[in-house]
Image: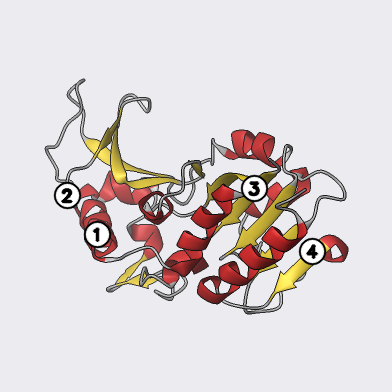
Amino acid sequence: MKKLVVLSGSGISAESGIKTFRDMGGLWEEYDVMEVASPQAWQENPELVLRFYNERRKKLLECSPNKGHLGLVELEKYFEVQIITQNVDDLHERAGSKNVFHLHGEIRKARSTVDENLIYNIQGWELKLGDKCDKGSQFRPHVVWFGEPVNAILDAASICEKADIFVVVGTSLNVYPAAGLIDYVPNNTPIFLIDPHDVNSKYSSQITYIKEKATTGVPLLVEQLKEKYANG
């Protein structure tokens, strides 16, 4: 089976009803997102940060995977599919995708503030002050905040280096370091980019553009890939 690597972004989740930071206009209620999603915010007002992520988590539990997520699952019948997602939600997993690598963490998990290797599933949607890990320290959301390094980027780059086919969906390749992952895809590897807007890339000559949203573009991609590669 050919290895198909998918880089997914907020656009695919937005179609399930999950607001992106861009949708928020940089604001949540009256707060700048830097005041609720950064290390400084955590130091100054952890209760506010927890409330912000609790509300996002609660909203996530009300949302369902869409045709974009489900189409990527269907591709597992024909390819070895590895998803690298910038999203912190679990919609890929809930759709049925077996191999999902999260670049920016997972909102339905919490981690220790003294040992980053202590990671726990959150039951339900609420994480409160006073909720502590086995070492007695406060839990924080298991996400990469603005201003924190994306430690998973090197592992993601290694995945991209093994791609026989590379797909980009729900991201405009403007947010780094994730946007730089395309640089690790082997030369002459076919690239498919699903986005309703024009996306400029230095790799345009090897990109097949599908100018659709994820819910309509991924089903089109499935048909194209089955026809071109599934029997190869």
Q: Amino acid at mark 2?
A: Gly
Q: Earlier in the sequence, mark 4 or mark 1?
A: 1
Cα distance between the residues tagged 4 and 1: 35 Å
Disc number for residue 1: none
The residue nearer to you, when weighing 203 against 151, is 203
Q: Which residue is mark 4?
A: 207
Q: Is residue 127 left or right of residue 216?
A: left
Mark 2, residue position: 124
Task: Identify the residue at the far left of this view.
Answer: 130
Can the viewer see residue 221?
A: yes
Q: Position of residue 71 (x, y in %)?
A: 52, 62
Judging by the rendered image, the residue that carries numbered circle 1 is: 61
Residue type (three-letter) at the residue carrying disc 3: Val
Describe the element under mark 2 as helix, strand or loop.
loop
Residue 224 lies, with reference to residue 1, above or below; the image says below
Lower sequence index among marks 3 and 1:
3
Q: Which mark is residue 5?
A: 3
Amino acid residing under circle 1 = Leu
